[in-house]
Image (cartoon, grey):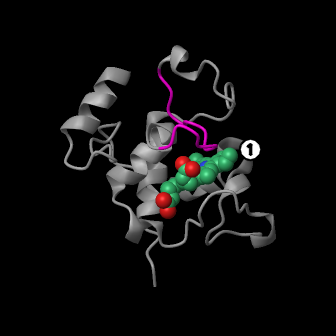
Amino acid sequence: MLALLLASVMLGGATDALDTPLTAAAGDAMRGRQIVENRQLSACLLCHSGPFPAPHLQGTIGPPLDGVGSRLSAGQIRLRLVDAGKLNPDTVMPPYYVTDGLNRVGHAWQGKPALSAQQIEDVVAFLATLRAP
Ligand code: HEC
């Protein structure tokens, strides 16, 4: 699976994107919003802020997610969710889609939140709707 991911990263136009969706079923932006807002499930708001409830409980470790759908393509967002470490080996953002146990050895976020392929697609669909004004 990792080889497949790498292959599609290299074959895709942009090298910082994963253009092929992980599932045949399209992502659902409404479910994606719920996943991002669910602190137990995804922990996104530990590090990111955005157009979500309770702004004072949102993180500043990562860039604000406001307007991210204007800055990044769906493929670029997908790669960052699947494994941000591919772009920045020192990132603190956990890899959210891990299929190979070995991939995680030594990672500080080992055993921490991971999402299913469908959940990744839902979050990609949602983040793509966050447009800059
Ligand atoms: C432990 C902190 C942390 C968590 C948890 C986290 N991120 Fe991140 N995220 C970061 C950091 C830091 C960056 C900046 C780039 C880097 O260092 O890799 C980033 C980058 C991003 C980017 C690229 C933004 C841009 O403008 O370039 C997106 C999109 C993103 N994160 C979405 C998410 C989503 C969605 C979740 C939850 C499923 C999440 N992140 C969870 C820390 C985190």
Measured along the vertical axis of the image, is residue 6 above or below residue 125? above
In the rendered image, residue 90 lying in the magenta stretch gets the answer yes
The secondary element bearing badge 1 is classed as helix
Give the quarter of the image for residue 118. top left
Measured along the vertical axis of the image, is residue 119 above or below residue 133? above
Q: Nearer the viewer, residue 38 or 85?
A: 85
Residue at point 65%, 52% (across, down): 44
Residue at point 66%, 68% (across, down): 52
Looking at the rendered structure, the kind of residue marked 1 is Gln
Q: Characterize the magenta stretch by its predominant secondary structure.
A: loop
Give the quarter of the image for residue 50. bottom right
Residue at point 40%, 68% (across, down): 71
Quarter placement of the N terminus: top left
Q: Is residue 25 visible?
A: yes
Measured along the vertical axis of the image, is residue 132 above or below residue 90? below
Q: Is residue 20 left or right of residue 36?
A: left
Q: Which residue is labeled 1 in the image?
A: 40
Which region shows up in magenta?
A: 88-99
**Residue 88 % position (x, y):** 50, 43
